[in-house]
Amino acid sequence: MKTSAVCAAAAVPPTTALRWIKYLQDIGLLCKVDHHTNRRVRWLGLSCDAQAILDQYFDSLIAK
């Protein structure tokens, strides 16, 4: 998802959304990837660690 789309979807001021994006990236839950043709666009995605955490969480819900 594009960084700008995440900021808009958060329904908070852009500075707040960007601060949280940076925090989640710093703790290893988000990763940013440059767009291959447009240097102004950055894509956000879940890190492998974040995906594993979410997989464990959803597996625990199914097991109950």
Image (cartoon, rainbow, N blue to C red):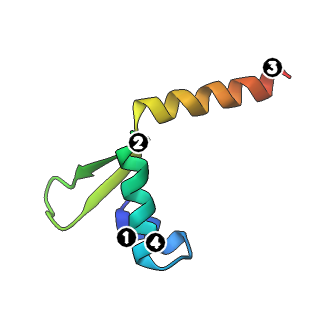
Viewer-side label of 2, 1? 2
9 and 36: which is toward the camera: 9
Q: Can you tell which mark lies on residue 63?
A: 3
Disc 2 and disc 1 in contact, CB within 8 angstroms: no
5 and 48: which is toward the camera: 48
Q: Can you tell which mark lies on residue 4?
A: 1
Q: How many marks?
A: 4
The residue depicted at 21 percent of the width and 55 percent of the height is: 35
Quadrant in which residue 31 is drawn:
top left
Q: Callout 1 environment at 10 Å: few (<14), some (14 to 19), or many (20+)?
A: some
Quarter holding the C terminus is top right
Quadrant in which residue 30 is drawn:
top left
Mark 1 or mark 3: whose residue is earlier in sequence = 1
8 shown above or below 56: below
The residue depicted at 46 percent of the width and 72 percent of the height is: 16
Mark 2 or mark 4: whose residue is earlier in sequence = 4
Mark 4 or mark 3: whose residue is earlier in sequence = 4
Disc 3 residue type (three-letter): Ala
